[in-house]
Image: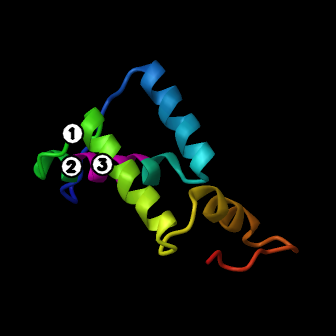
Amino acid sequence: MADGGMTLNIDEALAAKLKAAAASAGESVEDYARHALEVFADEQRDGVDPYDPAYLRALEKIAQDTVDQGTGVPLAEVRRWVESWGSEHELPTPK
């Protein structure tokens, strides 16, 4: 590509997964894939294995600690709030 970009060829099964995930996230396939690749590349650069059980437990503990301390908002509440955006019954920002 003339702009320094890259084109990737992926198989049909992966393409279907990507399309479904993008649709679920309400994003274009291109934006979703770009973001997913950016996150993955950053994790690899930083030496993070996002599938390591110890890493996942540490993240879960951090998330639960923020909720327990009253400094965080449960994900379910955030999702309900975001899903209400643009509707006639938009919810207030969760606290």
- Callout 3 secondary element: helix
Tell me residue 53's x, y (percent): 29, 33
Farthest residue toward the front? 68
The residue where tag 1 is placed is 49
Q: Position of residue 3 (x, y in %)?
A: 22, 60
Residue flagged by tag 2: what amino acid is it?
Answer: Glu
Q: How many marks?
A: 3
Per the image, the residue denoted by label 2 is: 43
Q: Is residue 39 magenta?
A: yes
Whether residues under marks 1 and 2 lie with C-beta atoms below 8 angstroms apart, the answer is yes
- Which of discs 3 and 1 lies nearer the camera? The answer is 3
Callout 2 secondary element: helix
- The span shown in magenta is 33-41
Q: Measured along the vertical axis of the image, is residue 24 above or below residue 3?
A: above
Q: Nearer the viewer, residue 3 or 77?
A: 77
Q: Are marks 3 and 2 in contact (CB under 8 Å)?
A: no
> Which residue corresponds to the image point at 21% horizontal and 49% vertical from the top-left?
43
Residue 78 shown left or right of residue 89 in the figure: left
Residue, disc 3: 58
